[in-house]
Every structure is written in C-alpha cells, then in structure tokens.
Amino acid sequence: MGASNKHLPLGHRAERYWAESRQPLASLIFILPLLAIYEAGVLLFGAQNGADQFMRRVLDVFGLGQHLLLPLLTVCILLGWQYLSRLPWRVSPGVVSAMAAESILLGLCLRLVPYLQNCVMAIEAPAAPGILRIVYEKMQNAVGFIGAGIYEELLFRLILLSLLTWGLLQTGMKPRICTIAAVLLSSLIFAAAHHVGPSGLEFNPYDFIFRTVAGVFFSVVFIYRGFGIAAGSHAVYDILVGVF
C-alpha cells in the first residue's frame, strides 16, 4: 500500500489524504496517543479539563464513575461511527503524521487571531518561582490542554453539534441552514460554558466573542476535516496560548 501511494500523482494523494483523514478510524488512531497522555497526566498531575469533569459527572449520575470509562466510551463512539459509515477499515501510511502537521498549522492560524491583542496587553510578570515549579506547572497545563482538545471537541462538536444538526433537520429546514444554525448555536454554548460553574471564568465580552469565533472555527474544521484534526488543532492552539 505504501509503495503504491508513492507512485500516485500528487493530486490523487492529496484527495486520498483529504478523504481518509476525515474518517473516524483515522481520528481514533490519531487521538489515541493524546488520550493516553491526558489520562496518565490526570493521574499524575490532577489536571482535569472542564468538559471532562462535566461528562464524568453525568456518568456518575448513572452510577458509571469508573475513571477509564469516559476514554473507553470515546474509543467506542469513534469505532461505532466508523462501522456505521461503512468505510474501509484502513488508514494509509503517512496519514496520521500529516494530520499532526495539519493540526499544528490550523492551531497556528487560530493563534494569530488574538496574538496582537495579547502582545499589547502583556504585563510584566512578577518574580518567577523556581525552575522545577515552572516546568511542573507547564506540564500540568499542557495535560489539561490536551484534554480540552479531545473532550471539548467530543462534547461540543461530535455530540452537541451533531445532535443540534439532527434536531433542526427534523423541523424540515434546509440542510445548509440547519448546519449553519447548529454551528452558531453550539459555538455560543461552547463560549458560554467557559463562564459557568464554580471554576468558570469572569465574563468578558472580548473573550466571549473570541471563543464563539473559535467555536465556529473548530466546528468548520470538524465538519470538513473530521474529529481528529479538530481535536488536534484545538489542543495545539491551547498549548500555544497557555504554555509557550
């Protein structure tokens, strides 16, 4: 398979990558290392993402509080999606590494949006703690951001966006209108969720608008490029902002 791919015209290879990278199986293979890093990081650093906490609380209501249940459900959802799609159970060589590169590129693109404002509003930091403390905090933050990439995309795009689109389609609206409305509504909910609960952030109009725009961005990535790249680019963006 790998040798035949090398001899395909560039246009055909690009088309194959575009199609295969959107498949649930490719998304699963791509996020598995991220999922393992995040779950191990939660146990080591206690850096749990808000969307992760919310979904675990929902599972707890039904007596399903086992730590590994949510990641196992994530894997099962993607496997079930692959099965229902009737697509081949195959991922060509190089697809996963190209997905990583695309995720980095998309994360960088979104990072440019608030970059100038962050530079203007930058404030001189107080005396820094010891180097070990800094490294520990950055690792803890990076783990949380990886979890945000996986579980926020699972909650707000794979689950919420899909359910909203399906629900709106039942009203008889045109599919395109349903998709646009679902993207906007899920993005507003995504932005609002950051200001809800005891750990919610203080409301700021700029932050709310930016997160809504980011929600639209990740929704478009999810629709056209699949869950894996949406989760990867989300994690990359959060790490760029919160760690570097």
Image: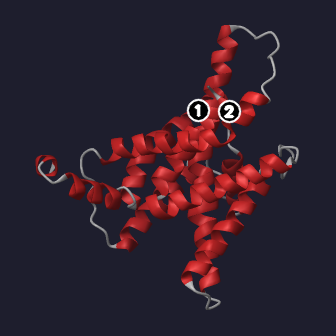
Residue named by callout 2: 46
The amino acid pointed to by label 2 is Gly
Rendered image quadrant of residue 12 = bottom left
Which quarter of the rendered picture does the C terminus lie within? Answer: top right
- Please name the residue shown 61% across and 39% down the image: 112
User: Tag 1: Cα neighbours inside 10 Å, few (<14), some, or many (≥20)?
Assistant: many
- Asked whether 82 or 173 is in front, the reply is 173
Q: Secondary structure at mark 1?
A: helix
Q: Nearer the viewer, residue 235 or 88?
A: 235
x and y, in percent, of residue 213 in the image? 68, 55
Location of residue 224 in the rendering, given as x and y in whole percent from the top left corner:
46, 62
In this rendering, the answer to whether 10 lies above or below 239 is below
Where disc 2 sits, the SS reads loop
The correct choice, above or below, for 216 with respect to 96 in the image is: below
Q: Position of residue 242 (x, y in %)?
A: 67, 31
Along the horizontal axis of the image, is 193 left or right of 187?
right
| Residue 39 on image: x %, y % | 56, 39
Which residue is tagged 1? 41
**N-terminal label among 2 and 1:** 1
Between the C-alphas of marks 2 and 1, the distance is 7 Å
Q: Are marks 2 and 1 in contact (CB under 8 Å)?
A: no
Image check: 4 left or right of 92? Answer: left
Residue that lies at the very extreme toward the bottom in this rendered image: 172
Q: Which residue occupies 65% across, 43% down?
A: 113
* Left or right: 11, with 237 as reference point: left
Can residue 37 be seen here? The reply is yes
Q: Mark 1 belongs to which amino acid?
A: Gly
Q: How is the image coloured?
A: secondary structure
Q: Residue at x 34, y 58 (%)?
A: 18
For residue 34, above or below residue 125: below
